[in-house]
Structure formats: C-alpha cells, structure tokens
Amino acid sequence: MLRKPEAKFWQLLKKNLSKISWTRIETRTIQGFPDLVGCFPSCGFFTAELKVIYSNKLKITPHQIAWNLQHHLKGGKCFIIATTLEQSTIKIYGGDKGRELAQNVPKTEPIAVFDKPFDWQLVHETLTKRTQNVPKSEEGDPRLSVDKTHTRERDSRLAER
C-alpha cells in the first residue's frame, strides 16, 4: 500500500507519464505485489514498485524483494522506481536489485538517474523500451531456492511415454 510520500510520487508519475496505461494496485492478499502495473504498445506489461529514499535508505520488504526477483528472472519487466523525499531525483532500478537496495542504496547501480527538471520523454523510454538481461537458465542461481529434481523426474517420465 502506498504511503503518503509514495502517493505523491505516484501522482507525479501518473501526470507526466500519461501515455502509459497505469493501474495502481493496493493489495494485502498478494504479499510483495508491486504498486503499479504499466502497459504500453512497444513493451507490453511491466510492473513498478515505488519507493522513497530517506537518508540514503529505502524500505523494501522481503516479500517485495522476492516477488520482483522471481518475476525478473522469469523474463518479466520489473522496476523499482525510487525518488528522494523532496522528489529532486528519480532513480530506476531493475527488479533484481531489491536485496542490494535494502542493504546499501548509494552503492546499488540504477538503470537510469534523472534530476530535476525531469526529462519525462527519457523516463518514458527507459520504462517502455528497456530490455532486461534475463538468465537463460535459473539453474545454479543462488538467489532462487528451487528444487528442480521433481521437475526433471517428471520430464523424463513424460519423455518415456
């Protein structure tokens, strides 16, 4: 659920990125689900978790980190969009950066940084044309704790039929 500074940030984005079809999601049933779903013809659907940076710190829950990472690794376009409290800077991070952001915001590399006055056309292009580097295989990725043994066994049984 969006807190007051995040709600102001949402209003700023909605007003200036109006060519993107936005849906604001407020849910307590799906833990970690991002604040926004965006859609644009050149890229389809993508998600955005909105955050406000307070004193070089950003509050992101373990569920938000997990949701964004999991969907990023499956090829989803997931962003974490952060602003300073005074909204003088906007930073766009990939969905795979949640854990790093929780630990150390200044050392986490964003996809893009925009200072006032914001270049809204470039913000728009960053969100709608960004292709993420998605691993070809999740196997061996230490960020996921997926046991694929059962899947392999099932696949080999199906192949034998």
Image (spheres, rainbow, N blue to C red):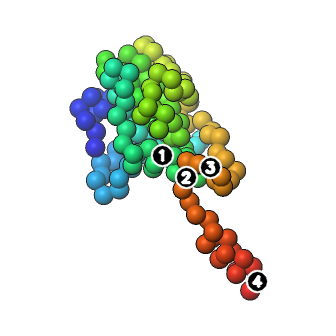
- Percent from the top left, x then y, of residue 22? 40, 42
Residue at the disc numbered 4: 160
Q: Secondary structure at mark 4?
A: helix
- Percent from the top left, x then y, of residue 21? 43, 42
Q: Residue at x 34, y 34 (%)?
A: 59
Q: Residue at x 47, y 38 (%)?
A: 99
Residues at discs 4 and 2 in contact (Cβ within 8 Å): no
Q: Residue at x 63, y 69 (%)?
A: 149
Q: Residue furthest bottom?
A: 161
Residue type, label 1: Asn
- Percent from the top left, x then y, of residue 28? 28, 53
Residue type, label 4: Glu
Left or right of 153: which side holds 62?
A: left
Q: Secondary structure at mark 2?
A: loop
Residue at the disc numbered 1: 68
C-alpha span from label 4 to label 1:
36 Å
- Percent from the top left, x then y, of residue 115? 45, 15
Q: Secondary structure at mark 3?
A: loop
Residue at the disc numbered 2: 144
Residue at the disc numbered 3: 141
Left or right of 116: which side holds 8?
A: left
Residues at discs 2 and 1 in contact (Cβ within 8 Å): no
Q: Residue furthest right?
A: 160
Q: Of discs 3 and 4, which sits in the foreground?
A: 3
C-alpha span from label 4 to label 2:
29 Å
- When the figure is inspected, residue 6 is found, relative to residue 143, above or below; the finding is above
